[in-house]
Amino acid sequence: MTSIFDLATDREREYLEAVEQYGSQRRAAKALGINKRTLERGVANLKRKAASRGYAPEHDMTRPAAPGFKISGQWTKVNVGKDGSEQVYQKSIYQTRDAEQFDEMLRDLVSAWCEEARGAIKPIAPPKHTQDALLTVYPMGDPHFGMYAWAAECGDNFDLEIAERDLVGAVDHLVGQSPESERGVLVNLGDFFHYDNMDGVTARSGHALDTDGRLQKMIDVGVRALRRCIHRMLEKHQTVEVINAPGNHDHVLALAMNVLFRNVYENEPRVIVHNEPSMRHYVEHGKCLIGVVHGHQTKDRDLPGIMATEKAESWGRTRHRYFYRGHHHHDSQDDFNGCKVEQFRTLAAGDAYAVGAGYLSGRDMKAIVMHKDFGEVARFTCGIDLLRAA
């Protein structure tokens, strides 16, 4: 049978046990060496939390909500006997998703992955020769792992298996085409995951999404795909940098991915994870400065000014400046004063919403080679038709 102890944290359980042992909150607080008000607040907060999850025996609530849910309402019918006694003969309990519990579950999940993966990565032999003047950027435009598309409706199929196969295949091809640059940068331009909640809807607008699989399955496949990409790049580049820009579909999971990969590769000095909790990230290479952003909160024309403000010293040291962004799924370049802003296509198929609205951009992934003195000197493209032919 559930009790309030089952819903308590270790500290809250300590408070309850002390009150039970010493008979009052005042004596319990004294025995624990804390202020009485601190203990009172702790017990009161626990009772409120327990009630929101369906446990408050003094108010006839003894059936806790399922994990990830909270009680949003209760309706009870009671018969009153001639002697004044009451008997419940009908009760309805309403449960809804609990965002706070979901965040806790997500943090626990990421922590568990970090513990399992710690030390599990075997070192990969570095390339025998690399060119320190070169840096190769691999921008991933909106991969949308977890999105589902049906060919009869959307023109092409898309699911988790296809997303992993296409991304890993494209990176493998592009790494093979690229020169042996000293640095390789894997850039997730945002919306790597199609959703980051239990309901499969966009966090900002609540739009229902076409999804493939369960949340944890989506994360498992996405993490595995990124690891395979990183390992392939380590075969070609001396150091591999990883950037995960938060998108409008996966703001929470983008931050979680940074935490996860920082832990996974903590003993691999050749992998550098950009884990700043910010919407924009920057890479400096000689006279080159590259900014990364998803692009759903900023206008392209404002990005050069944002770069000059956020990275004033880097701006002054560099001559070739670029801002890479995703979000709109199509190729576009604007050459503003001091900085070129470029949008990138995605490898993902269009879902029913995008195809219905007429958003039918081409699909590919690129690798861009930067020289420390001359800026961009080469680029390679892996289109979806090339992947299908391979």
Image (tube, rainbow, N blue to C red):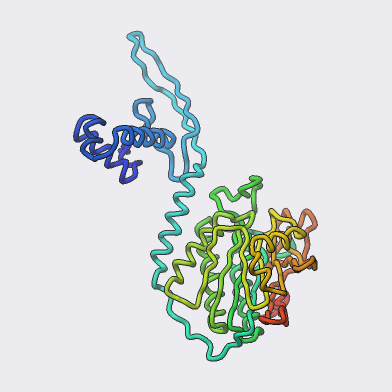
Q: Quadrant of residue 341?
A: bottom right
List the single residue furthest toward the top. Answer: 82
Relative to 354, 146 lies left or right: left
Relative to 302, 116 lies left or right: left
Residue 117's x, y, as percent?
Answer: 42, 68
Q: Is residue 92 above or below residue 112?
A: above
Relative to 168, 371 lies left or right: right
Residue 18's x, y, as percent?
Answer: 23, 37
List the single residue furthest toward the bottom. Answer: 128
Q: Which residue is pictured at 56% across the width and 82% down the height?
A: 237
Residue 187's x, y, as percent?
Answer: 62, 69
Q: Which residue is pictured at 69% across the width and 53% down the height?
A: 297
Question: Can residue 6 be seen here?
Answer: yes
Question: Can residue 158 be seen here?
Answer: no
Q: Quadrant of residue 351?
A: bottom right
Viewer-proximal residue among 198 and 41: 41
Viewer-proximal residue among 244 and 353: 244
Q: Is residue 39 above or below residue 209?
A: above
Q: How many marks?
A: 0
Q: Which residue is pictured at 44% across the width and 71% down the height?
A: 266
Q: Which residue is pictured at 39% across the width and 30% down the height?
A: 61
Residue 292's x, y, as percent?
Answer: 65, 65
List the single residue furthest toward the left. Answer: 22
Relative to 25, 199 lies left or right: right
Q: Quadrant of residue 253?
A: bottom right
Query: Quadrant of the image for the N terminus?
Result: top left
Query: Quadrant of the image for the C terminus?
Result: bottom right
